[in-house]
């Protein structure tokens, strides 16, 4: 459907499963110290501080 609506996908904009997992892990490591948990599905009430 994407191809019909827009055009063939440009591979440089699409990450594979392994790269997606790697990047998600890196982002989560940054978010957790400030109280954003589970990819933004939970958070620590108040103002968490980064260590």
Image: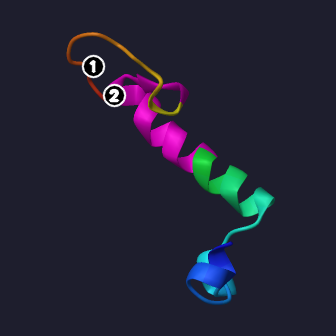
> Which of the two residues, 6 or 33, is positioned nearer the viewer here?
6
Image height check: is 41 above or below 10? Answer: above
Crowding near the residue tagged with mark 1, few <14, some 14–19, many ≥20 C-alpha atoms within 10 Å: few
Drawn side of residue 39 relative to residue 23, left or right: left
The magenta segment = 25-38
Helix, strand or loop under label 2: helix
Is residue 37 on the magenta stretch? yes
Q: Check the picture and name the quadrant holding the C terminus.
A: top left
Pinpoint residue 44: horizontal percent, then vertical percent: 35, 13
Drawn side of residue 40 relative to residue 47, left or right: right
Helix, strand or loop under label 1: loop
Drawn side of residue 38 relative to residue 19, left or right: left
Image height check: is 9 above or below 31? Answer: below
Q: Main secondary structure of the magenta part?
A: helix
Alpha carbon separation for disc pair 1 and 2: 5 Å
Q: Check the picture and name the quadrant holding the N terminus.
A: bottom right
Residue 42 found in image quarter? top left
Query: Pointer 1: what residue?
Result: 48
Q: Residue furthest left?
A: 47
Residue 10 found in image quarter? bottom right
> Which of the two residues, 40 or 28, is positioned nearer the viewer here?
40
Residue at position x 68%, y 57% in the image: 20
Residue at position x 34%, y 28% in the image: 34
Pinpoint residue 25: horizontal percent, then vertical percent: 62, 44
Query: Pointer 2: what residue?
Result: 34
Residue at position x 61%, y 89% in the image: 7
Image height check: is 3 above or below 20? Answer: below
Drawn side of residue 2 relative to residue 29, left or right: right
Pinpoint residue 13: horizontal percent, then vertical percent: 59, 78
Whether pointer 1 and pointer 2 mark residues with C-beta atoms closer than 8 Å, the reply is yes
Image height check: is 13 above or below 37? Answer: below
Question: Mark 1 or mark 2: which comes first in sequence?
Answer: 2
């Amino acid at each position: 459907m994407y191809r019909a609506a827009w055009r063939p996908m440009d591979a440089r904009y699409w990450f594979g499963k392994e790269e997606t997992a790697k990047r998600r892990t890196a982002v989560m490591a940054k978010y957790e110290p400030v109280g954003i948990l589970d990819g933004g599905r939970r958070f620590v009430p108040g103002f968490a501080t980064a260590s």
